[in-house]
Amino acid sequence: MDPLRSSPSGNSPGNRIDPEARLRIINLTRSTDLATRAEIATASAARRKGLLGRTGLPDGGGLWIVPCESVHTFFMKFPIDLIYIDRKSTVKKVRRNVSPWRLSACLSAHSIIELPAGVIDRSQTIVGDRLELIPAEPVAEI
């Protein structure tokens, strides 16, 4: 399912998405969480910036870049895991522990999920797995 086009309930929110929205990313094949509060980068500027300027990703964090079929880690300060998915949220390619100053691409991908290094190994995510991207639960205000 493409969360930009339809919601889990089947109701379509259209192509507009709140840039402050967060996603829970679940590997349905393995019944594991990949992220609990992933950010979304759909605007051109946000897709170009990606994770640049950050010093790391928190546990449960991530960034879904859509559309996107290649990334670089030039000027990054930490390694990341990459999961390339198609429009049906099927994993097309995984790259583990991608160090700064690298390039990576998957021309058959529709989008890329950037995660903290180690998430792919912990979740045992492999090519062919089905993912689900759903709105994250709101954080309770104290």
Image (tube, rainbow, N blue to C red):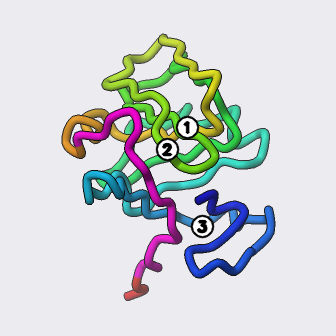
Q: Nearer the viewer, residue 31 or 71?
A: 31
Q: Amino acid at mark 1?
A: Ile
Residue bounds of the magenta highlight: 124-139
Q: Please tell me whether mark 3 or mark 1 is closer to you in this view.
A: 1
Give the spatial CA distance, label 3 vs label 2.
22 Å
Residue at 30 percent across and 40 percent down: it is 125
Q: Which mark is residue 122?
A: none
Considering the numbered disc 1 on the image, is that residue within a helix, a strand or a loop?
A: strand
Q: Amino acid at mark 3?
A: Ala
Answer with left or right where residue 131 lies relative to residue 117.
right
User: Up-down: is 111 above or below 26?
Assistant: above
Q: Quadrant of residue 129?
A: top left
Residue lying farthest to the left in this orientation: 122
Task: Please give the residue where the numbered disc 1 appears in the rendered image.
Answer: 112
Q: Nearer the viewer, residue 68 or 129?
A: 129
Q: Please tell me whether mark 3 or mark 2 is closer to you in this view.
A: 2
Give the mark nearer the N terminus: 2 vs 1: 2
Q: Which mark is residue 90?
A: 2
Considering the numbered disc 3 on the image, is that residue within a helix, a strand or a loop?
A: loop
